[in-house]
Image: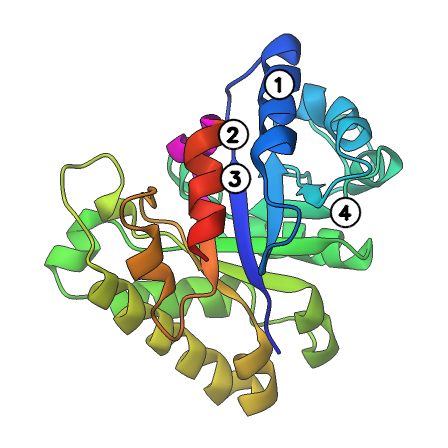
Amino acid sequence: MRKKIVAGNWKMHKNAEQTEDLLNELIAKMPTETDAQVIVAPTFVNLASAVDHLEFTNIDVAAQNVHQAEAGAFTGEISADMLKSVGVNTVILGHSERRAIFHETDALIANKVDTALEHDMTVIFCFGEELKDRQSKSHFNIVENQLKDGLFHIQANQWENVVLAYEPVWAIGTGETASPEQAQEMHEFIRQTVRTAFGIEIADNVSILYGGSVKPDNAKEIFSKPDVDGGLIGGAALKAEDFVAIVKAI
């Protein structure tokens, strides 16, 4: 049975004091029982304190990225072993901003996936098409290629540590809007693509999150779709009230 998951990607927001304040708000407002696994991803410098702060709660901590090498002369980078050493066991990889701004390729992301899985980390694997891809009607091909080139090299037994996160980049901060029906259409396609490559059991058990500007006012309708298993939340994750409302919508 696949998990329901709501993950908040804080991106480059919140210093140490602000991180503590937001975590305290989340602890105070979060339901003690929820159908969803709840994850927050603060910045690297606040990960250790977040893990400590959330130790006795139902909120988990993820990193926003990891380097593919075990160690070495990679100034400014963070290894999987470093994340594990502070209690972080989940990492977001392939985010649209990493692809677009930092020019991460499918091949590089595939290497990062391997490193994370070798360290028994859970990977939230992000992918999705841009506006030009949607307009040219190549969006299904783009998504399929990102999955195959960045993820489909893994072994069947590694899928238990993989969560998929579909990001329609064209619907994030562009003024365009993706409907719940469009989300379901793509999620169904993604699940079928996994089914074709790895079989029905893996496809039916992998969680597929939606990362297209989920907010309190649209979360319930989006999450009601049969192939949408939760959300990867951006801006709304920075406000405790909004994030908790999204969790409750699951």
Amino acid on which the number 1 mark rests in the picture: Thr
Q: Residue furthest right?
A: 85
Q: Earlier in the sequence, mark 2 or mark 4?
A: 2
Callouts 2 and 4 close, C-beta under 8 Å = no
Residue 12 placed where, x, y %?
A: 51, 21
Q: Earlier in the sequence, mark 3 or mark 4?
A: 3
Q: Which residues are magenta?
A: 233-239
Q: Earlier in the sequence, mark 1 or mark 3?
A: 3
Q: Secondary structure at mark 4?
A: loop
Q: Is residue 158 magenta?
A: no
* Label 4, label 1: how far apart the Cα atoms are: 19 Å
Amino acid on which the number 4 mark rests in the picture: Asn
Amino acid on which the number 3 mark rests in the picture: Gly
Nearest-to-viewer mark from 3 and 4: 3
The dot on residue 10 is 2
Residue 198 placed where, x, y %?
A: 57, 85
Callouts 2 and 1 close, C-beta under 8 Å = yes
Q: Residues within 10 Å of mark 2 (few under 14, many from 20)?
A: many
Quick check: can you spot residue 43? no
The residue depicted at 79 percent of the width and 36 percent of the height is 83
Callouts 3 and 2 close, C-beta under 8 Å = yes
Nearest-to-viewer mark from 2 and 1: 1
The dot on residue 89 is 4
* Label 1, label 3: how far apart the Cα atoms are: 13 Å
Nearest-to-viewer mark from 4 and 1: 1
The residue indicated by pointer 1 is: 19
The residue indicated by pointer 3 is: 8
Q: Residues within 10 Å of mark 3 (few under 14, many from 20)?
A: many
